[in-house]
Image: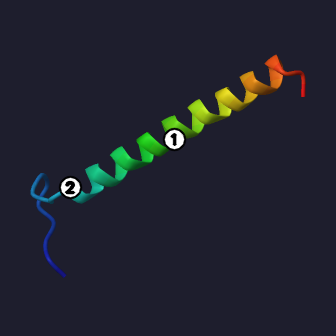
Amino acid sequence: MAENKHGEMDTTQQEKTFEGFVRVSVWGVVVSIGILLFLALFNS
């Protein structure tokens, strides 16, 4: 097993994955709020 050296790990893939997760989460919230507003306006 390789010895761990603090600060030398390549985290580019993790950062891209996290950015994607945040993007999907934000879109999910926006869509949910849009659906709730639609239901409130049209009294469904």
Image quadrant where one finds the N terminus = bottom left
Closer to the camera in the image, 32 or 19:
32
**Which quadrant of the figure has residue 13?**
bottom left
Q: Is residue 28 above or below residue 38?
A: below
What residue is at 20 percent from the left and 55 percent from the top?
Answer: 11
Q: Is residue 8 above or below residue 25?
A: below
Please name the residue that numbered disc 2 is placed on.
11
User: Horizontally, is 5 left or right of 35 in the view?
Assistant: left
User: Horizontally, is 39 left or right of 35 in the view?
Assistant: right
**Which residue reaches farthest bottom?**
1
Q: Are marks 2 and 1 in contact (CB under 8 Å)?
A: no
In this view, the mark in front (2 or 1) = 1
Closer to the camera in the image, 4 or 26:
26
Image quadrant where one finds the C terminus = top right
Label at residue 10: none
Q: Amino acid at mark 1?
A: Ser
Label 1 crowd (10 A; few <14 / some 14-19 / many >=20): few
Label 2 crowd (10 A; few <14 / some 14-19 / many >=20): few
User: Horizontally, is 21 left or right of 31 in the view?
Assistant: left
Please name the residue that numbered disc 1 is placed on.
25
Q: Is residue 31 above or below residue 6?
A: above
User: Horizontally, is 37 left or right of 11 in the view?
Assistant: right
**Which quadrant of the figure has residue 37?**
top right
Q: Is residue 2 above or below residue 30?
A: below
Comes first in the chain, label 2 or label 1: 2
